[in-house]
Image: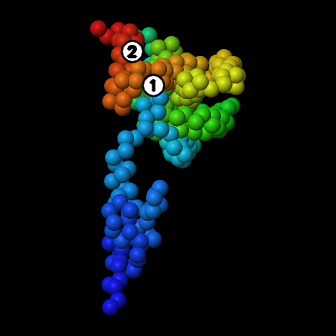
Amino acid sequence: MEAAATTCYRHPSYETYVRCTRCDRYICPDCMREAAVGHHCVECVKDGQSSVRQARSLFGGAVPRAAAPVVTYVLMALNILAYVVEVVRSETVDRFGMLGALLVDPAGGQYYYEGGTYPGYELTGVADGEWYRLLTGAFLHLPPDTSFGVMHLVFNMFALWNLGRVVEGQLGRARYLALYLLSAVGGSVLVYLVSPETTAVGASGAIFGLAASFYVINRRLGRDMQAVNRFMAGFLLWMVISAAFTSWEGHLGGLLTGGLVTYGLAYAPARLRTSAMQLAGGVVLVALLGVVVAVRTAALTGAA
């Protein structure tokens, strides 16, 4: 008498004689997962993975894996898309660039704002409640008809590509995105504090935040700092030189914010390096930046 043919428990039409070494069910080649001893079925592999606690990195996220820097790609795409919009609609920078406070007359003329109200003149900028400029300005760049033009975008995207991949790989996607956005806003807040009448655009504030993060990460991981120190010296030198034609306030604000955020992620006590605590810390920082903006607005407008 011939023995009955055995088939895969997931694919009954497939005849097989191999069993899962954990559950003893028959499995076909499509369902086999190599194990230390024999093979496991897909369900046993899934159950085993769910019972293993995921390792955490020094910065509170999952241990970095070899994966595409998706967030960096998306940020670059958004910056490039925003630039295309600028080319098509030239008023985009005036509408969404980082601007603290300016008076605009009916003919479009711009004037310094020194508080109070002026009939026939309209206040525009963050002081008029346009808080979105604190972030949108970081995705815009100098228009193509200016002296620096498209090279402003090219240089920033080159820096983002080189720094972003490293920082994203160490912090993980969520923390990296939070760092980028907080650095961008931190740069805009310093622009608002120091030069509210200046329109500032560019991802430089966020990128300086990534540079500071890169420095803190390497120091925390105990790596050779000679090359890193030279890199940071070059970044700081560029911030000084470029102050003649770019917003040094945005650069410095992004640098300080990025360094502060990463320092918190890297050096906080282990019990505080949890997702919930880090999220709470991010919310507190956003609230503090909001208070700074509100106080500066009150000072500018003379509001009680």
Q: Is residue 262 above or below residue 160?
A: above
Res 173 visible: yes
Give percent across and percent down for residue 254: 52, 23
Name the residue beneath numbered marker 1: 265
Q: What crowding class fits label 1: few (fewer than 14 Cα within 10 Å), some (14-19), or many (20 or more)?
A: many
- In three-dimensional space, the C-alpha distance between marks 2 and 1, rounded to whole angstroms, equals 23 Å
Q: Is residue 139 above or below residue 32?
A: above
Left or right of residue 33, residue 44 in this image: left
Residue drawn at 44 percent across, 10 percent down: 114
Determine the secondary structure under disc 1.
Answer: helix
Q: Mark 2 is on which residue type?
A: Val
Give the camera-side residue of 252 and 3: 3
Residue drawn at 46 percent across, 29 percent down: 59
Give percent across and percent down for residue 40: 40, 61
The disc at residue 64 is none
Whether the residues at callouts 2 and 1 have beta carbons within 8 Å, the answer is no
Give the camera-side residue of 304 and 2: 2
Q: Quadrant of the N terminus?
A: bottom left
Res 106 visible: no
Q: Mark 1 is on which residue type?
A: Leu
Residue drawn at 36 percent across, 29 percent down: 274
Disc 2 versus disc 1: nearer the observer: 1
Give the camera-side residue of 245 and 9: 9
Considering every residue shown, the one lying at the far left of the view is 304
Left or right of residue 214, residue 122 in this image: left
Name the residue beneath numbered marker 2: 292
Q: Quadrant of the C terminus?
A: top left
Q: Quadrant of residue 218?
A: top right
Q: Quadrant of residue 132?
A: top left
Among numbered discs 2 and 1, the one appearing first in the sequence: 1
Give the camera-side residue of 85 and 29: 29
